[in-house]
Image: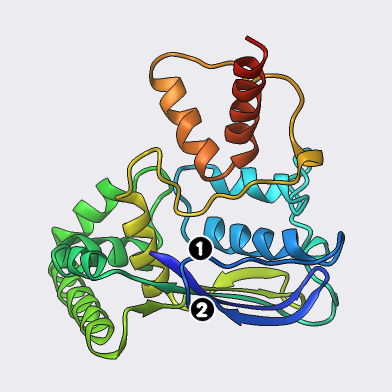
């Protein structure tokens, strides 16, 4: 997967920005405080809210971007809107490889269950058990067939019309709500992201040096370090680069 295009409306200092990335490498150049980091923050925000990689990533990123107040858990839409009276939209154009498209085609049944689970109001933390109970009923099996046909149709369209998905985040200041425009696009990109190795982030970026945490992050051994590694590649990239920065300093001083 790669980010082939990006369209941002009313996100902080970016009023209406749209560009495509036809080549593997794209360089964004400009003076300080012009919005280069804001572009990356928009992608980070949309990716974590629409396609979270681990439980709690949404909260971590919202707090990191000063959109969620950690003490009151209040969502501050005004912290992300350039004009508080206008809606926000962040549209990611994700291009799939032939291998990734084949992976979707080979996992239609899994994707159908994911789509059905997301379409239902299931108890938090008990989604899989609740889905099992639902699929034990005639209406549940009927809904699964319908979800399977939806997935097959979507994947077929990707094959015939180009390997592009457009997960899109929208914010409505009047209703004070955040939502996605296309659930299927979110699910397919999210599924592919979760199949990546732990050390391969779907989206990670190098924050400005002034945003780096001070001191060295303690490295643990075992399951806790695996979780920290996942988070450092997804929701907390500053942790990864803080470790790298300290490693370079240590190696240079020996």
- Residue in view at x 61 percent, y 81 percent: 19
Residue 120 visible? The answer is no
As drawn, the label of residue 50 is 1
- Residue in view at x 29 percent, y 69 percent: 97
For the residue pair 16 and 56, the one nearer the viewer reads as 16
Q: Is residue 75 above or below residue 23?
A: above
> To which residue does mark 2 refer?
181
* Image location (x, y in percent) of residue 94: 43, 72
Per the image, label 2 sits on a secondary structure element best described as loop
For the residue pair 159 and 245, the one nearer the viewer reads as 245
* Image location (x, y in percent) of residue 207: 70, 46
Q: Is residue 248 above or below residue 195?
A: above
Quadrant of residue 44 in the image?
Answer: bottom right
- Residue in view at x 40 percent, y 50 percent: 123
Residue 166 visible? The answer is yes
Specify few, some or many for label 2: CA neighbours under 10 Å numbering under 14, 14-19, or 20 or more: some
Name the side, left or right, on which 227 lies relative to 57: left
Name the side, left or right, on which 123 lies relative to 9: left
Specify few, some or many for label 1: CA neighbours under 10 Å numbering under 14, 14-19, or 20 or more: many
* Image location (x, y in percent) of residue 34: 84, 67
Quadrant in which the C terminus appears: top right
């Amino acid at each position: 997967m790669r980010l082939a295009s990006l369209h941002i409306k009313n996100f902080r200092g970016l009023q209406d920005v749209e560009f495509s990335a036809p080549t593997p490498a794209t360089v964004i150049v400009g003076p300080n405080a012009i919005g280069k980091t804001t572009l990356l923050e928009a992608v980070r925000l949309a990716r974590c809210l629409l396609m979270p990689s681990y439980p709690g990533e949404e909260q971590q990123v919202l707090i990191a971007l000063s959109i969620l107040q950690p003490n009151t858990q209040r969502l501050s839409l005004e912290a992300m809107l350039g004009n508080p009276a206008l809606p926000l939209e962040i549209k990611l154009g994700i291009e799939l490889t032939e291998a990734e498209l084949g992976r979707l085609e080979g996992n239609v049944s899994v994707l159908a269950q994911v789509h059905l689970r997301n379409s239902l109001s299931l108890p938090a933390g008990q989604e899989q058990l609740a889905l099992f109970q639902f699929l034990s009923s005639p209406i549940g099996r009927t809904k699964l067939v319908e979800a399977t046909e939806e997935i097959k149709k979507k994947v077929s369209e990707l094959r015939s019309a180009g390997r592009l998905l457009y997960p899109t985040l929208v914010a409505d200041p009047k209703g004070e709500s955040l939502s996605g425009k296309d659930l299927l696009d979110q699910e397919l990109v999210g599924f592919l992201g979760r199949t990546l190795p732990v050390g391969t982030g779907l989206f990670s970026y190098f924050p400005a040096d002034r945003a780096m945490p001070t001191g060295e992050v303690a490295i643990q051994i075992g399951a806790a370090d695996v979780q920290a590694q996942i988070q450092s590649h997804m929701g907390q990239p500053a942790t990864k680069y803080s470790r790298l920065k300290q490693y370079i300093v240590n190696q240079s001083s020996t």
